[in-house]
Image (cartoon, grey):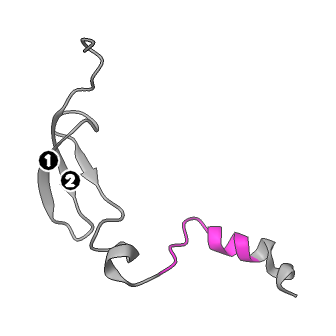
Amino acid sequence: MKADIHPEYHAITVVMTDGTEYQTQSTWGKEGDTLRLEIDPLTHPAWTGQHRILDSGGQVARFNKRFANLGI
């Protein structure tokens, strides 16, 4: 195995959408960084069974405006 090709593995804090926190090991960020999740198993439709549209920056509105005339 080649030396010095693997990323550093260190402890980080993960904050879920409901505010709960836990410590884990990761190659993300630096030692002691905090990773805040926008979507996790508590909010993701695949686990909750609820589907909702998250309109980030008006993307859904732009799509509807752009393709409004195609459904004639």
Q: Position of residue 19 (x, y in %)?
A: 20, 66
Q: Secondary structure at mark 1?
A: strand
> Which residue is found at the position 23% from the left and 63% from the top?
16
Question: Which label lies toward us, 1 or 2?
Answer: 1
Residue indicated by mark 2 = 14
Q: Residue furthest front?
A: 1
Residue indicated by mark 1 = 24
**Residue bounds of the magenta highlight:** 52-64
Quarter of the C terminus within the rendering: bottom right
Considering only vertical position in the picture, is 12 above or below 58? above
- With 34 as the anchor, is 62 left or right in this view? right
- With 16 as the anchor, is 11 left or right in this view? left
Considering only vertical position in the picture, is 9 above or below 61? above
Give the image quarter of residue 70: bottom right
- With 54 as the anchor, is 69 left or right in this view? right
Q: Position of residue 18 (x, y in %)?
A: 22, 71
Give the image quarter of residue 69: bottom right
Considering only vertical position in the picture, is 24 above or below 52? above
> Which residue is found at the position 28% from the left and 38% from the top?
28
- The three-letter code of the residue at mark 2 reads Val
Q: Are marks 1 and 2 in contact (CB under 8 Å)?
A: yes
Q: Nearer the viewer, residue 5 or 22?
A: 5
